[in-house]
Image: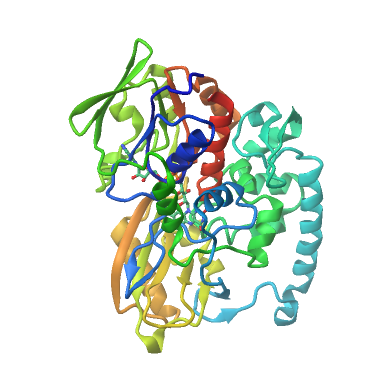
Amino acid sequence: MDKNIRICIIGGGPAGLSAGMYLEQKGYENYTILEKLDRVGGKCWSPYYNGRRYEMGAIMGVPSYYAVHDVEEFCGITHDGPKLNRNYKDRTGKVIEPFEPKKNLLKIPRLLKMKKQLKKFGELLETKYKGYDINGHRGVAEGRYDGFSAANAKREKVSGVNPNLKDLALPFSEFCKKNDVELIQDIWIGPFTSFGYGYFDEIPAAYVLKYLDFQTCMNFVKINLWTWKDGTQFIWESLNDHLKNPARLNSNISKVERRDGQVYVTVNGEVEVYDKVIVTSPLYVPNKEGRDDGLVGMVDYFDARPDEKKLFSKIEYERYDVLACEIKPEHHPEISYYVFDNMIPERLGHLMVYYRRWRDTVDQVITTYALRKHKNSEEVPYEKCKKMVLRDLKTMKNPASKVVNEWSVYYFPHVFSETYKSGWYDKVEAMQGKYDTYYAGEIMSFGDMDETAEYSRELVERFF
Ligand SMILES: Cc1cc2nc3c(=O)[nH]c(=O)nc-3n(C[C@H](O)[C@H](O)[C@H](O)COP(=O)(O)OP(=O)(O)OC[C@H]3O[C@@H](n4cnc5c(N)ncnc54)[C@H](O)[C@@H]3O)c2cc1C
């Protein structure tokens, strides 16, 4: 492709900014990143409180975050944040140690069985499900893998046929049942459901395992995690500062038309002309009328073609709410807590985890996390969920004195099993470039910083 082509990137989150970085590294310098907000970072949002930054969005990474590491190297920064630590409480606020046999004598047989299943699961993933952990979903529904290996920082290109991969379209609970490893869900649920990615009876195993591949999940278990002193937003602010063309903030795109091999983008009332467009912002927002942030999908402001409309209308997202709370010093939690009892659909809207970021002080906020949507349950309204979470904090004996920030975010876009199985990803991948348009961002891989940045890397590698 001609290195001088004009490329428009929509969205200044991890996917858009890293697309800029990888394009630049490949010699494409004529790119423009359009960000609608007055800041970069997207769901990596780290506001200030009492002179320090806390996390409203992304919090942590693991050592296999190779694309994030690329960004760190590009900017000369590192993961220099506070060490994470956590404990567990039951729904009554009692501290428990669910994985410690000595504290759970009655559960010893179950814990031993879980350990056995964990070993078996690790082996199955390496053998029966070879190719499961490749970034993106190309070929999976047809029993193929094709992409870049996540096994090490080199990310070699790999491809192959493995009909067993079709199982990844199953909801994760069914996938585990099929493989006789149901108990491992007790381990995977912590960094999955409590992180807002939905419930195992509804979310295809592909999402669970591409994000929480065996190694990554073990890193969570061992708390071998990365954080950033100035927040995850700092990673993307640094990248933006180092790009030849930093994102243009406050860009209000009202229309995108693709005709005669060019892309006409109306930004803040002016028409700009590009050769290609990369969309990293939401492709589709169901029930957008109910949102007060005015978020819309690309199909709403693009001259969306029938195939785009049809495919993207299958996209769902999670209702994941974050509160930042002041808690008086005498009630401040000692550490972060997970509440496993609340990670089941029957406890929709309840507090699943709360995070104490700064261990050296009690003058910082605590953030809380709750899910209020499940495929087969009635959605819990926002205000009701907020009340439930605040009540739960009281039950945990860490009552909030004030809510200083709150966010109900468009979280983890995904498709459900039937759509996944019908080859949704292969149909979308076949459309890449068709209308001078490329689709990136969370839906194309998974809703975390690294998978989205990694997908942008692959996109640039494949098409530019
Ligand atoms: C509470 C929470 C906790 C999380 N925890 C973690 C974690 O610990 N680790 C981790 O790796 N990830 C975590 N994530 C997920 C991670 O933040 C996201 O997956 C990642 O930010 C996705 O990057 P993206 O660029 O695809 O999308 P986004 O971050 O959503 O960025 C999209 C950008 O596009 C912009 N945009 C939207 N519409 C338009 C438009 N019409 N025109 C122009 N711009 C537009 C948005 O303003 C935004 O800046 C968390 C997220 C949340 C909310």
**Horizontal side of residue 218 vs 25, given as left or right:** right
72 or 281: which is nearer to us?
A: 72
Res 392 → quadrant: bottom left
Q: Position of residue 277 (x, y in %)?
A: 40, 26
Task: Report if residue 411 is visible in the image.
Answer: no
Residue drawn 28% across the image and 44% down it: 249
**Horizontal side of residue 452 vs 287, given as left or right:** right
Task: Report if residue 103 is visible in the image.
Answer: yes
Q: Position of residue 420 (x, y in %)?
A: 57, 32
92 or 100: which is nearer to us?
A: 100
Extreme residue in the bottom direction: 330
Q: Position of residue 338 (x, y in %)?
A: 53, 70
Residue drawn 50% across the image and 83% down it: 334
Q: Position of residue 463 (x, y in %)?
A: 54, 24
Instruction: Count the marks.
Output: 0
117 or 74: which is nearer to us?
A: 74
112 or 194: which is nearer to us?
A: 194
**Horizontal side of residue 284 vs 459, given as left or right:** left
Up the image or down, 405 lies above or below 238; here it is: below
